[in-house]
Amino acid sequence: MTIEERFYNIGRLDDLSRDDSPVHRLDARVKIIVTLVFIVLVTSYDRYALGRLLPFAAFPVLFSAAAGLPSLFILKVLLVTSPFAVLVGIFNPVLDREVILVAGNLAVSGGWISFISIITRFMLCMSAALILVATTGFYKICASLMRLKVPAVLTVQLMLLYRYLFLLVEEAIRLLRARRLRSFNRKGSGIESTGALLSSLLTRTLTRATRIHDAMRARGFNLDLPLGTAGRMRLSDFVVLLSVLPALSALRVFDLSGSLGSMITGGAG
């Protein structure tokens, strides 16, 4: 995948947020609260609680289907970002070798279970965050956070970080394209020129960002965002909020996967 294609994938989330579906029409505050509760509940389990995480997969699957999001694109983004989770838990099988699960002749150590649990948590939380952005848009998320009384310093920093991400990628595309045009037979495009390329990218990005910041301050920018009309939450928003939150809490309180496993093994017996 070229850097141009990666840049298109970053902007595609905002393009998807302009679609029309029941999930898109939900108030952004409802989606933010539900997503935050989902992430807190998923990350609240201990490192060996792999089975109890599986029922939570119904949340991103159902919301993604209701929003009409392209599952292949979401899966591709998850696979691209998954190496971060792999690096976090890659040494667990080496450090934790105590066997805690025996299935026939197969003995599974706690390290492997905790490693798979980390990957599962990452996939669930990342998919929920992607669905939130793809059905709301990053600007609406920041504006709704301010309406939820999140400090403006944090929300504005998030918005500027997101905006400058596109700025950084645009400058990187220009530099890489210029290097390709000036390289003959792949000369000058090796690792030896990467240091100078990164230095130039940092300098150009900071210079352009400084010009943008000066222009913002010249226009009286003082951390106040034009939020537009806040709008009241509709009845459907309250119905979704009061339906999804108890359902997620029930998944946290009750061991649904364990109960189903007991029913299946009991029935088989």
Image (tube, rainbow, N blue to C red):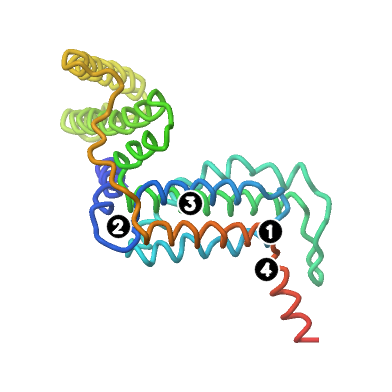
Q: Is residue 176 left or right of residue 42?
A: left
Three-letter code for the amino acid on which mark 3 is drawn: Val
Q: Residue at x 81, y 69 (%)?
A: 105
Which numbered disc covers residue 257? 4
Q: Position of residue 125 (x, y in %)?
A: 51, 49
Q: Residue at x 24, y 15 (%)?
A: 210
First in sequence: mark 2 vs mark 3: 2
Residue bearing mark 2: 25
Residue bearing mark 3: 34
Query: How far apart are labels 4 and 3 at the CA level?
Result: 22 Å
Q: Secondary structure at mark 4?
A: helix
First in sequence: mark 1 vs mark 2: 2
Residue bearing mark 1: 253
Q: If the image is split into quadrants, where does the C terminus sit?
A: bottom right
First in sequence: mark 1 vs mark 3: 3
Crowd tier of the residue under label 1, counting other residues whose Cα lies within 10 Å: few below 14, some 14–19, many 20 or above: few
Q: How many marks?
A: 4
Query: How far apart are labels 1 and 3 at the CA level?
Result: 17 Å
Q: Position of residue 100 (x, y in %)?
A: 82, 57
Query: How far apart are labels 4 and 2 at the CA level?
Result: 32 Å
Q: Position of residue 184 (x, y in %)?
A: 19, 32
Three-letter code for the amino acid on which mark 1 is drawn: Val
Three-letter code for the amino acid on which mark 4 is drawn: Ser
Q: Is residue 188 left or right of residue 266?
A: left
First in sequence: mark 4 vs mark 2: 2
Query: How far apart are labels 2 and 3 at the CA level?
Result: 15 Å
Q: Secondary structure at mark 3?
A: helix
Crowd tier of the residue under label 2, counting other residues whose Cα lies within 10 Å: few below 14, some 14–19, many 20 or above: some
Q: Secondary structure at mark 1?
A: helix
Nearer the camera: disc 4 or disc 2: 2
- Choose top left, top right, bottom left or bottom right for residue 255: bottom right
Query: How far apart are labels 1 and 2 at the CA level?
Result: 30 Å
